[in-house]
Amino acid sequence: MMKLTSRLMYSEHQKFLQQRQDALLEELRQIAIEDFPKAQEEYARAQASWEERQKKKAENKDEGMDVDTPSRAHSPVPAESDAPNGKEKGEKIPGTREREDRPPQQRFRFTDAIKSRVWGLVHLSNESARLTSVMHGWDNTVPVATEQSLRKSLYSKITAVFPEGWMNSQTISREVSNMKLRLKKEVELAGSKVEE
């Protein structure tokens, strides 16, 4: 009976999930439209700051000074034990110079409103994948849509609601992973409080 009920409800439930996804995507589009001027201002400030740093770096190199190496008169050389991350004195932390040399990227900050919409979309996508897997399990067929393929499709839909070049699937994936980790820590913390 469960199998029959699920078969009858599957298409309706998938339509409901799709309608809810469309509604959340539209809410996300509205948030992107409202927050776009603020994102442009932040980008303009970051770009101006980066250009100023590049200009100072070029001026200092022209004068024969190397900006990347601090002057011994202005800053003491740290003792070996004071060196960050166990680095020997004089060693630079890898990746810091490359980050400073790259211009800032156009991107939206993930506000709580954006995070909640994206998290809701991920849950709907996961539920759709779960339902599809159950249906294919009863038919003994291989599911066409896996959670990973649905997630990839979802990330491209989310990217499309933002202005072009201001969001990418890697950023979304990273934020979703961070949200999962935060949720896992909260659950573990709540579980430990219950045990006490």
Image (cartoon, helix red, strand yellow):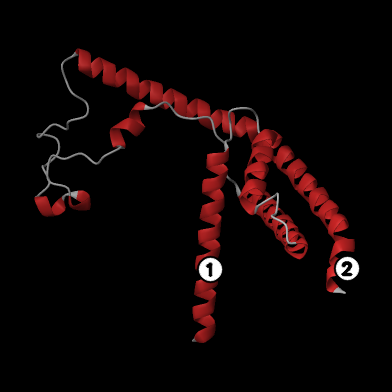
Determine which of the numbered discs, if any, sits on residue 186 in the image.
1
Determine which of the numbered discs, if any, sits on residue 4 in the image.
2
* SS state under label 2: helix
Which percent across, then down, holds residue 45?
Answer: 48, 28
Going from N to C along the chain, the mark reached first, 1 or 2, is 2
Q: Is residue 105 left or right of residue 158?
A: left
Q: Which is more toward the observer, 75 or 187?
A: 187
Which percent across, then down, holds residue 12?
Answer: 88, 56
Instruction: Name the residue rendered at 68%, 56% in the picture.
Output: 126
Image height check: is 7 above or below 194? above
Which percent across, then down, holds residue 114?
Answer: 64, 46
Residue depth check, mark 1 versus mark 2: number of the one nearer the observer: 2
Instruction: Name the residue rendered at 26%, 39% in the picture.
Output: 94
| Residue 176 shows in the view | yes
Q: How many marks?
A: 2
Q: Residue furthest front?
A: 140
State yes or no: discs 1 and 2 in contact (Cβ < 8 Å): no
Instruction: Name the residue rendered at 29%, 32% in the picture.
Output: 97
Q: Is residue 99 left or right of residue 109?
A: left
* SS state under label 1: helix
| Residue 114 shows in the view | no
Which percent across, then down, holds residue 69?
Answer: 17, 30
* Amino acid at the residue labelled 1: Glu
* Amino acid at the residue labelled 2: Leu
Determine which of the numbered discs, if any, sits on residue 131 in the image.
none
Q: Is residue 95 left or right of residue 87?
A: right
The quarter holding residue 67 reads top left
Q: Is residue 71 left or right of residue 125?
A: left
Judge the density around disc 2: few (<14), some (14-19), many (≥20) Cα neighbours within 10 Å.
few
Compute the Cα span from label 1 to label 2.
38 Å
Image quadrant occupied by the N terminus: bottom right
The quarter holding residue 60 reads top left
